[in-house]
Amino acid sequence: MSTLELTKQLMARASVTPADEGCQQVLINRLEALGFTAERLRFGETDNLWLRFGTQSPLICFAGHTDVVPTGPVEQWTSDPFLPIERDGKLYGRGAADMKTSIAAFVTACERLLADQPDYPASIALLITSDEEGDAHDGTTKVVDVLRERGELIDYCVVGEPTSSTVLGDTIKNGRRGSLSGNLTVIGKQGHIAYPHLAINPVHTFAPAMADLTREVWDEGNEYFPATSFQISNINGGTGATNVIAGSLNVKFNFRFSTEVTAEQLKQRVHAILDAHNIQYELAWSLSGQPFLTDAGRLTEVAQAAIAAECGVRAELSTTGGTSDGRFIKAIAKELIELGPINASIHQIDEHVNVADIEPLSNIYQRMLVSLAV
C-alpha cells in the first residue's frame, strides 16, 4: 500500500481529539509485521502507542498524533471532511496536513528501509498519541514519563508536524517558544460613576501597569528565537451599564518566551510591575509549554541533506509557531526537530496536502533513517 493510500485509510477514521478510532491499530498491524514491538499506553480517554524496532543505538524516533481538530461547519466543506478525496492535485480531508500524511509517511519509510536493510544497525520507534490537539494531559507527556522512568532515552526525534511554508521541506522547526498564560483580576470597588471618590476604578488603577507591561523588554531573543512577546488577549470589566464603575477587571495575557528567560523570571517581573503600582489583584498562572531548542548539528544537517536530495530545497531552521508535543519529548531526546508537509490549511475548512508531496515526504524520512544509523 502506498503512502497515499495509507494516508487515506487513516483520514477516513473520524478521530476527533481525543478519539483514535482505530488509527493506532492500523499502525500496529503494519509495523508488527516488520518486527516492531507494540506497547499500548492508555491514560484516561487517551490512546498512546510506543512501537519499537531493535535494541541498538542510536534510537531514532518518529512522533505524532492520530487525533484531529473538529471539522467546523460540515456544510462549508467542499466534500465530506472524513471522506478523503483527490481534487486538482490535492488530497482533501480533516487530518490531511495535521498530521496523518506524516504518520503514513513514517510507516512506509520504515517498510521500505527494512525491506532493503533487514539487519538495520540502529533502533526505530514511533511515539503516537490521540491527544495532541486537546488538553494533552494524558498524551505524549505521560508516555515520556514512562520512558524516562525506565531509562529509555531517544537519540534523534522527528516530530511530523506540518512545518513547510511554501514548498515541501522549506522549513524545519528546531525549537519552539514556551507559552505562559496569566489570568489577572484587578480588584476595585463598584460605585456610581457620578461619585468616583466613593469607588475604586480597577480600569484606571491597571492602566499605568498595563502601559509598563506592554513597554517592558523581557529579553532580546537569540540567534534562534525572537524576543519574548507579552500580549493581552482579553480585558473584561463592568456591568454593562454606563453609570456604574466596575468592581473588578479581568485581564488575560500570554507570554511566548525564548530560552533567554525562564517562566519563573517572567512571573517575578510581572508581579514586581503590578506591585510597584500598588494594585490589589489576584493572578493565576498556567504554563502550557517550556521552550526547547536543538542547536544546528547532526540531526538538522541530516534533515537538510535529505530534503535537498529529495526536493532540491535548502531547508531553513525556524522556531516560530505555536506549541507541539516536542516540548515534552525534548526532555528525553538529545536532538529533536519537527518536519512535515505544508501547513497553510491546517485546522481550516477544506484542509489539504499536495498529492505530489506525499511520497517525497516518506522518502525524506527514509533517507534520514539511513543517514542517522551511520
Image: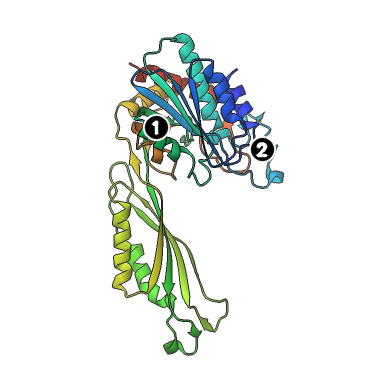
Q: Residue at x 42, y 30 (%)?
A: 158
Specify the label residue 147 is tagged with.
1
| Mark 1 residue type | Leu
Q: In x, y percent, where is residue 303? A: 38, 26
Distance (Cα) linking label 2 and label 1: 35 Å
As drawn, the residue found furthest toward the right would be 75
Specify the label residue 344 is tagged with.
none
- Pick the front one: 90 or 192: 192
Report whether residue 209 is seen.
yes
Name the side, left or right, on which 291 lies relative to 13. left
Quadrant including the N terminus: top right
Q: Which residue position holds label 2? A: 81
| Mark 2 residue type | Pro
Bin the neighbour count of mark 2 within 10 Å (Cα to Cα): few under 14, some 14-19, many 20 and up.
many
Quick one: SS at disc 1? helix
Tag in front: 2 or 1 = 1
Q: Please, is residue 330 above or below residue 219 in the view? A: above
Q: In x, y percent, where is residue 188? A: 43, 78
Q: Please, is residue 74 above or below residue 281 in the view? A: above
> Where, by quadrant of the figure, is residue 223 drawn?
top left
Q: Please, is residue 217 above or below residue 356 in the view? A: below
Name the side, left or right, on which 65 lies relative to 260. right
Quick one: SS at disc 2? loop
